[in-house]
């Protein structure tokens, strides 16, 4: 009886969804969006700006940055560096310095949210990406960040790419923090990726499919 039940389940699984390989001629929509874990991850990723306080295990951060450095990059030159900060005191300190620097300026209202935990969209871990400016390096770092956000999603974590909070690091008040990140000579901070356990489930932001055209 048990064997029969298992056989029926197996038959149901085989017929209710595709064979997980669209190239083999599957015409079911689930194959594209549900059964394929890569596509599912891409389509369900959202920028997360509310996080639980839970600490992100370093093994997961390690895996995320490892996925990052496996991104395609021009001539495999790898003109990038990565710094990971999961020290809440450091994130608090740089946030307080940003709030202080913004006081009395138009930036002040950005920090008026009483629920703000830190200046990095509240993420408990922040991955800073620097590049040695060159022809492809900004693109390379964007691809790296893309890999990181998808890796984070696939590991059950939320993430958000950010450039806004980095403006501060180019100001005199931000210089000590930039130095603490310790990028090598000739490298510039370009973007960062906040990572943590999501405390929100935002809707997908609309995408304009009109921008896509086949050229016959
Ligand atoms: C290069 C780059 C810079 C970004 N900078 C910020 C930022 O400073 N603050 C922020 O909240 N989101 C930032 N974002 C996230 C975008 O706002 C977000 O990706 C976009 O609205 C689409 O939403 P989605 O990621 O949920 O699909 C940035 C994204 C990228 C790729």
Image: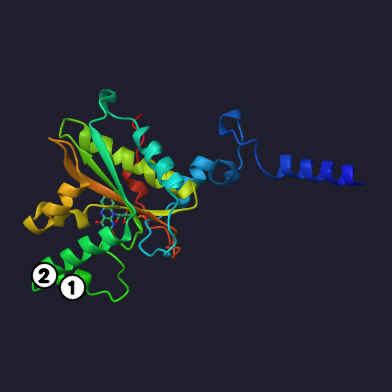
Category of crowding for the residue at label 1, using alpha-carbon neighbours closer than 10 angstroms: few (below 14), some (14–19), many (at least 20): few
Q: Position of residue 10 (x, y in %)?
A: 77, 41
Q: Quadrant of residue 132?
A: top left
Q: Quadrant of ligand 1?
A: bottom left
Q: Position of residue 95 (x, y in %)?
A: 22, 64
Category of crowding for the residue at label 2, using alpha-carbon neighbours closer than 10 angstroms: few (below 14), some (14–19), many (at least 20): few
Q: Which residue is at the front of the view, 107 or 206?
A: 107
Q: Quadrant of residue 125?
A: bottom left
Q: How many marks?
A: 2
Find the distance from the CA under tag 1 to the CA under tag 2.
7 Å
Q: Which residue is at the front of the view, 17 or 194?
A: 194
| Left or right of 59 in this view: 103 | left
Q: Residue furthest bottom?
A: 114
User: Residue at the spot x=40%, y=37% of the render?
Assistant: 67
Residue on which the image places disc 1: 109
User: Residue at the spot x=38%, y=65% of the render?
Assistant: 50
| Left or right of 32 in this view: 190 | left
Q: Which mark is residue 106?
A: 2
- Say if 144 sits above or below 43 in the image: above
- Say if 116 sits above or below 63 in the image: below
Q: Secondary structure at mark 1?
A: helix
**In what quadrant of the picture does the C terminus appear?**
top left
Q: Quadrant of residue 134?
A: top left
Question: Disc 1, disc 2: CB below 8 Å?
Answer: yes
Instruction: Find out if the beta carbon at label 2 lies less than 8 Å from the nearest ligand 1 atom.
Output: no
- Say if 137 sits above or below 171 in the image: above
């Amino acid at each position: 009886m048990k064997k029969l039940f298992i056989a029926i389940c197996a038959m149901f699984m085989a017929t209710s969804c595709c064979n997980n390989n669209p190239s083999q001629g599957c015409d079911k929509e689930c194959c594209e969006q549900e059964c394929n874990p890569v596509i599912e991850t891409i389509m369900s990723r959202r920028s997360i700006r509310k996080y639980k306080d839970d600490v992100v295990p370093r093994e997961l951060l390690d895996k995320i940055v490892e996925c990052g450095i496996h991104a395609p990059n021009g001539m495999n030159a790898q003109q990038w560096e990565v710094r990971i900060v999961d020290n809440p005191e450091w994130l608090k300190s740089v946030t307080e310095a940003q709030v202080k620097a913004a006081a009395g300026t138009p930036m002040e209202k950005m920090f008026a949210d009483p629920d703000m935990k830190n200046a990095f969209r509240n993420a408990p871990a922040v991955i800073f990406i620097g590049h040695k400016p060159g022809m492809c390096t900004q693109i390379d770092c964007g691809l790296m960040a893309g890999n990181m956000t998808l890796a984070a999603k696939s590991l059950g974590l939320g993430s958000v790419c950010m450039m806004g909070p980095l403006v501060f690091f180019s100001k005199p008040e931000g210089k000590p923090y930039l130095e603490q990140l310790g990028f090598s000579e000739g490298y510039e901070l370009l973007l960062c990726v906040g990572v943590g356990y999501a405390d929100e489930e935002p809707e997908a932001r609309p995408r304009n499919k009109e921008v896509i055209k086949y050229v016959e």
